[in-house]
Image (tube, rainbow, N blue to C red):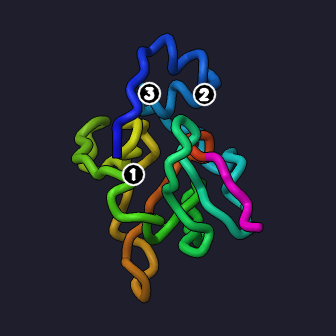
Amino acid sequence: MKKMIKTPEQWRKKLTPEQYHILREKGTETPFTGKYIDMKASGMYTCAACGNSLFSSETKFESGSGWPSFYDVATKGNVILKEDNGLGLRRVEVECANCDGHLGHVFNDGPREKTGLRYCINSCALDFKKEK
């Protein structure tokens, strides 16, 4: 996969201020406010910055965390996991492998009968392509 590289100015032109803050500055949206928290439609969640396929609706579940949650990625290699020790916490950050956009974090408290993982992802870091 060829990396999408843009200057901060190019990203600011492409993204909304909230998307820029989350995807480029590693921010987060307020819990229970994201547009995809209650989404039930079938389809693919893609990176809002570059369109990379990230999560299938088949792996989405209700975690009660306040952010869309998935127990697996759509395609291995489309996300990168990085250690994040910011805010005095030890967490694992989830980034888009194509554009390095910050998506959220992954935790080990997901559905045990699946992967045991909970990818906790910001809605505004995502776009949704409905299944036809």
* Quadrant of image for the C terminus: bottom right
Gap in angstroms between the C-alphas marked 2 and 3: 10 Å
Gap in angstroms between the C-alphas marked 2 and 1: 18 Å
- For mark 2, give the secondary structure: helix
Residue 66, label in figure: none
Residue ID at (22%, 47%): 83
Gap in angstroms between the C-alphas marked 1 and 3: 15 Å
- For mark 1, give the secondary structure: strand
Q: Which residue is mark 3?
A: 24
Q: Is residue 130 above or below residue 17?
A: below
Q: Which residue is mark 2?
A: 18
Of callouts 2 and 3, which one flags the residue occurring earlier in the amino acid sequence? 2
Q: Residue furthest front?
A: 2
Of callouts 2 and 1, which one flags the residue occurring earlier in the amino acid sequence? 2
Residue placed most toward the observer, 119 or 99:
99
Q: Position of residue 46 (x, y in %)?
A: 57, 51
**Magenta span:** 127-132
Q: Are marks 1 and 3 in contact (CB under 8 Å)?
A: no
